[in-house]
Image (cartoon, grey):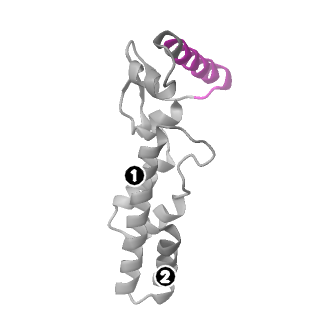
Amino acid sequence: MLAYLCCNGGRAVRKRMLEEIMWAGAERGRARDSLYKVCGFITRWQENEGVQLPLTICREEIYLDTELIELDLQQFLRYHESQDAGDWERAEKLYTAPLLFENSYDWIEEYEAVYDMAYYELLSRLAAHYERDNNQEKRLYYNGKLKGFR
């Protein structure tokens, strides 16, 4: 659930929607119970371990303020959106596909596609940049990554 909230970019999510995403196929009562158990676990985890998450659990929504925590996903997008080739290289180093590579969730495919497309675009941009700069070593490096990514 925390991974979903992080991928969701800090937008509030209705509890009902989380129930449907996290516990697809479960009857509504069981899904709601599961959501409350997860919320309780997170609350106890924060209290017992001293972990501080900017997580707000309201009556019908859950909100994780992703601006108050450091997320590689957000850093990747910031570097990707930059106009600086150094930032593009930093973004390329952050990318370790697939998203949440050790875990497979139905909901993650949409996010994987977004980051995969951004990474492909980033490699293309880097290869073109170094071609314009006549840096053959880096151009070949990023073109090789592009070929391996397809």
**Does the stretch in magenta take in 26?**
no
In the rendered image, the vertical position of residue 83 relative to residue 104, given as above or below: below
Residue 121: quadrant of the picture: bottom left
In the rendered image, the vertical position of residue 128 relative to residue 92, given as above or below: below
Label 2 sits on residue: 138
Identify the residue shown where x is 52% and y is 79%. Answer: 141
Label 1 sits on residue: 114
Q: Position of residue 49 (x, y in %)?
A: 67, 25
Q: Earlier in the sequence, mark 1 or mark 2?
A: 1
Q: Residue furthest front?
A: 25
* Type of amino acid at the residue the image marks with label 2: Lys
Q: Position of residue 75 (x, y in %)?
A: 45, 52
Residue 14: quadrant of the picture: top left
**Does the stretch in magenta take in 33?**
yes
Please identify, in this view, whether the residue under mark 1 or under mark 2 is nearer the observer.
1
Instruction: Specify the segment rendered in magenta.
Output: 32-51
Identify the residue shown where x is 46% and y is 78%. Answer: 143
Callout 1: few (<14), some (14-19), or many (20+) C-alpha neighbours within 10 Å? few
Q: Is residue 62 left or right of residue 3?
A: left
Q: Where is residue 131 in the image (x, y as percent from the top left)?
A: 38, 85
> In terms of depth relative to the viewer, which is nearer, 33 or 52?
33
Identify the residue shown where x is 45% and y is 83%. Answer: 139
Identify the residue shown where x is 51% and y is 86%. Answer: 137
In the rendered image, the vertical position of residue 101 relative to residue 81, given as above or below: above
Kindly report the secondary structure that dominates the magenta region of the rendered protein.
helix
The secondary element bearing badge 2 is classed as helix
Q: How many labels does the image show?
A: 2
Q: Position of residue 31 (x, y in %)?
A: 51, 16
Q: Which residue lies furthest to the top in this view?
A: 29
* Type of amino acid at the residue the image marks with label 1: Val
